[in-house]
Image (tube, rainbow, N blue to C red):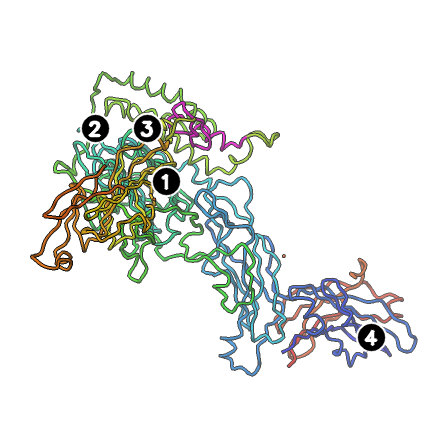
Amino acid sequence: MEAVFKCQFQPIPGNVVYDVQWYIDGTLLDNAKYTGVSYSNINDTALRTKHWVNNFTLSFQLSCAVRVRNVTTGIQGDFTESYPYFAGIKSSQLQYFVFEGETIQISLEATVPFSCPSTLSDAMKDSHCNFQFYIWTPGEGQCVNGLTSNGVAFKDNPCGVTFGYKDKTASISVTGYIDGMVNFRERKSTLRIASTRNPMDSTGIWNGAKIPDITVTVKDKDSLVSGKLCASYTDPHQRTFDGRYFSNQRAGEFLLYRHKTLPYTVHVLFSACVWRRATCNCGIAIRNGRSLFSVRTCAEISTSWTKTLTIPEEKTEICNDNDLHIEKFWRYYTVTFPSGTEVSFSISWWSNWVGSIRIRASVSDIGETEGLCGPANNDVTDDFIPRNGQRATDLNSFAESWRIPWNSAEESLFVKNPKLLTKSFSYSSEGNTDKENYCTCPSDEPLDPYSPDFESRNQAHCNQTTPSSVCGSQVSMVMDSSACDTTSRRRKRSVESDDVGDSTVLTYATDYDETAVFNVSDWINGWNATSARKYCTDAFTFDPAVETCNSLVNISSESYIDSCVEDIKMSGNTTWVDDTLDTLKGACLTEAKKQEVFYTNSTSNSSSELSIIQLITAQLCPANCSGNGECKDAACFCRNGFIGSDCSVRLSVPPTDFSLPSSGICDTRKRSCQKTNIVGKFYSENVVAKMLYFEIEEMEVSESFSVTSNATFRHFNLITVTLPSVSASTRRRRRSVMDGVHGWNISLSYDGITFSDLVTLLVYDSQRYSCDTKTLTCQKMISEARSSSKSGPDVNIPAIAGATGFATVAVAVIVIVIVLIKKKRFPEGRAQSVIGIQKEDGLKTIPRNDAGSLWVGGTDYGQPIPSLPPTSYVYQQKREPTDISLHFEEKN
């Protein structure tokens, strides 16, 4: 099939001939000029594919021009040019507007019919003659605050649009991308669309065809959720999204936040922190579908006094990198859902309690949340809606309804294998639980635009349940490899066998009373309402961050001071004041980071000035860096000799509280034993490890050696040490009774001078030996002993497996020794007509000065023809054509 364009016009009476020429985008085609053609042969002046296909691609403006010549007199007129006709595919408009999270339709129109071989059956044409166009969005895909900063997403559309060979229109579903920022600038997204190669298009006229760029301006909706912060802090004071405060002095697991139509939940743990007077946060679990991230600081739940863990326990089970964005900075954590909802929390600076938990709502949360956070809908009167309820109730009924039953395997996120992760998502009968599917398109034009694999070639990122996505997630080791779903997918876990850690089981104390609610009325330890309020007011007044947050971010300290007073009343001391201050600072930082205007310079006349966000974050460091460092971007930069998130620790003091996973045993049957994690409390990213090697020898002492190297800092409670390789020259020269049993005595330092006490890593094969790291002794297994014994009865051979020096132990007659070893318009006023395309059943002619229509494959496009000037004497002499139209057809 060949694409043919014909210039159509009414003939002029008399002995005349015509000159015809063609233009594409205003360029005269030298190979498509015709002279002295009679009207009966006018179809011979058609523009054919061969005239342009190698020099132009579709999506161009096409026009023809005609002039008449009197054969008898030799007089010729001027060229009269048709209106330009757009040949290709175009959108009805080039500028669109859409709100974040809302969807619009962009319509595309094909002004040239698609071709398909006539030899094919209708069924074959339907299935094979489809013309595909791919989409890319330049300049997008940056990562900001844990979210990918795009302009638009494509709903149920893998970055492309398809036309069937009979189609004249198609549409694209475009959704405004949620960027999690309150924008003060317009966000614009450019859609670039180009064709792929279709083997059924033998003429190749669509190859490389591009649709004119479409611009979509995204209207901001994040201002609707400014200040929407749900919080649970200190002992524990609660704040709903709409700003209602209450106290929840109960122990146990509670549902803090849940989205009605998305599989997002946040659970919290409360346990007694002041004997019979107050409970505090000691755990948080954040779930998206089958992915989970949790941090727990209590070993058990109690209503009297709680046992806390020496080291906070983290659990990371991630099915997909796009499920959660996890950032960790010292004792501060930020977890972002794909919707843009952000969960921030911190471990208390003075103890192992979770001092502050904050959830900042996103556009997707508006009217869609429940739990202790309540609905985010700007109506405080319905904040206390209980589980499965329709109306608000009293505080007690509301709070109790969101309790997770004691140690419930069906609902708890703190049990060993939470069944909630394996359940199909079904929260609200009112919510729309149909899974949405959004795609984002690449920012660069694909390198191979004609690959037959359309979707893969375009690298669309789909399967997003919201028009937003997380980016750059930082996840740590995984403790559980439970199935993510019923197929072969598994939870994301470390590919290194040595990336292991211990996990404990949360228990409930024997005194645990699920019905207990603490409600103290008395003051203790000499405190009263007046002295407590003065202390708290002074603490907030004299902290420079409070005024900065109030004046720039509109964070009021009033409610936090009230909370501080309540803390002193319940605890009888001031230990929670800094955590309350940190909660205010955290709320301030979270809100400031969401304001795009804060990223501009504070003084517009000076490019050297700091941005507002930099001014704010320079006040938001923990404990104001203890006077031992400079605060910048909410992080302390300590002076020489000091370390820690608040610069409160001296460099010369080595780590003290740390331990090895698996009680210091490295089983070569399960691990490569080339690295080991060390769990503890670390105050610097620079930790030096000294490793002393030892092995068990028979009858002979090998020289011991030590290696010092830098550990890999993972988080404030986790480092990884790479064990040195041991060359053959340093290993024993003959077989030992305890062949393969060896280990390392490891000590740590911050300054490389002063080292800590030792911990022992014992390396052996558990099928050959049984070792006890508490007594540092090993026994050869019976089967192993039998195979190695030439005669006599089966024996168990004990040996000492770790020490700080040399030692010998006599067993029967065997001596075991320990050795310590790292992309000619005519003048104005010229009479022109309109280009049209002839219908298949005959020529469409347009009388002079009548309104006409543009025909494409039998379809009326309804474009009017402009009026021509009245006939003049000159015109009669020149006998010019009056109206010109354009006819398109396909030739075999």
Displayed quadrant of residue 169: bottom right
Residue in the image at 23% along x and 44% along y: 701
Residue hosting label 1: 709
Expressed as whole percent of the image width and height from the top left, the position of residue 127 reads: 49, 75
Q: Nearer the viewer, mark 3 or mark 1?
A: 1
The Cα–Cα distance between marks 4 and 2, rounded to whole angstroms, is 102 Å
Mark number, residue 35: 4
Q: CA distance from mark 4 to mark 1?
A: 88 Å
Find disc 3 in the rendering and name its residue. Answer: 653
Residue 518, how many percent across, how many down? Answer: 19, 30
Residue shown at 36%/33% (left/top)? Answer: 752
Disc 4 marks a residue whose amino acid type is Thr
Vertical placement of residue 856 versus 825, above or below: below
Pointer 3 with pointer 1, Cβ within 8 A? no
Q: CA distance from mark 1 to mark 2?
A: 43 Å
Which quadrant is the C terminus positioned in? bottom right
